Image (tube, rainbow, N blue to C red):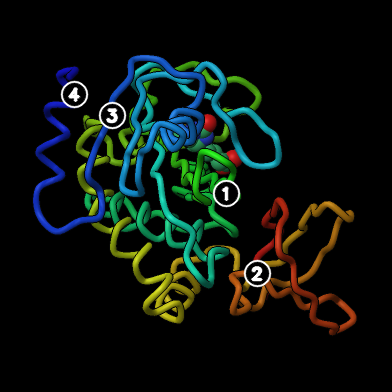
Amino acid sequence: MSAPTERLARHLRGASSWHTIEHHPEVTSTNDVAHARVAEGATPGLVVVADRQTQGRGRSGRTWADVTGRSLLSSYLLGVPREDATLIPLAGGLAVVEALRRFGVRPRLKWPNDVLLGDGKVAGILAERYAATGDRPAHVVLGIGINVDWRGVERDETTASWASVAEEADRDVDRFEVLAELLHPLDQWLQAVATSPQRVLGLYRERCATIGREVRVTTADGEVRGRAVDLARSGALVLERPDGAAITVTAGDVVHLRRAG
Ligand code: BTN
């Protein structure tokens, strides 16, 4: 067991769905490791954490950048809920917001599940759903990447606008402390997907910086513009177009335009 794994194991005590935390110095992607473990018999409740990813994945086929030891790179193995699986990434976003608030910062959500500090992205969430195969039951891998301490880190084009918790809080922040603060709310909000989906949607609306904004959304079918007015029951974004028509967007990349007056 690596030293961080031993230290992290302390956080598994108490009522929680998480039963094992694996720590790795380097992996392709923590999501890959969690998925591979299912073929080896791993059950929901496994958590995989790494110091570095060589092929970190983001949404829409993008890569997810990290600097060794400066981000919390983590994946959570979940079963597939009978209903409302589309709310899983939203629940993940709520849990990240709750965890980061413990460090004195006030994150907001950009639909569907970017976590922002000011206008800068501090965390991203990637939920990957797998159907059952011969050797694996159906499962979901929820990947969460949080930029914890990027002080002094040189940014590139992609990361130029990224924020980090330590920069915003203006103090040292340890990524394993962030994980410790994340485990409980993540468990609670994931359970709420099954038991009280309206609570997930209700708090998401409150924490969401997108609702009320003029937005441009790039979807698989092209670009749509309008004012984000609500979330649908599935967690999809409801837009009011300039002609007054309402449209619902299930997936896409949002750009916040000017604030609605
Ligand atoms: C996004 O905003 O595009 C989602 C980013 C998700 C990144 C995390 S880091 C841990 C896990 N492993 C990955 O390869 N991706 C997710």
Badge 4 amino acid: Pro
Q: Quadrant of residue 12?
A: top left
Badge 3 amino acid: Glu
Mark 4, Cα crowd under 10 Å, few <14 / some 14-19 / many 20+, is some
Q: In the image as oriented, which residue stretches furthest toward the front?
A: 134
Q: Residue 13 vs residue 102: left or right?
A: left
Q: Which residue is mark 4?
A: 4
**x, y percentage for residue 235?**
59, 70
Badge 2 amino acid: Ala
> Does residue 43 appear anywhere in the picture?
yes
> How much space separates mark 1 and mark 3, taking CA atoms?
23 Å
Q: Residue 66 vs residue 245: left or right?
A: left
Q: In the image as oriented, which residue stretches furthest toward the bottom?
A: 244
Residue 132's tag is 1
> How much space separates mark 2 and mark 4, taking CA atoms?
38 Å
Q: Residue at x 57, y 35 (%)?
A: 161
Q: Which residue is mark 3?
A: 22
Q: Which residue is mark 2?
A: 236
Mark 1, Cα crowd under 10 Å, few <14 / some 14-19 / many 20+, is few
Quadrant of the snapshot with the C terminus: bottom right
Q: Secondary structure at mark 1?
A: loop
Q: Secondary structure at mark 2?
A: loop
Counting residues from the N terminus, which is met first, the one under dot 1 or under dot 3?
Answer: 3
**Viewer-nearest of discs 4 and 3:** 3
**Viewer-nearest of discs 2 and 3:** 3
Counting residues from the N terminus, which is met first, the one under dot 1 or under dot 2?
Answer: 1
Q: Tell me whether circle 4 and circle 1 mark residues in contact (CB < 8 Å).
A: no
Residue 22 to residue 125: above or below:
above
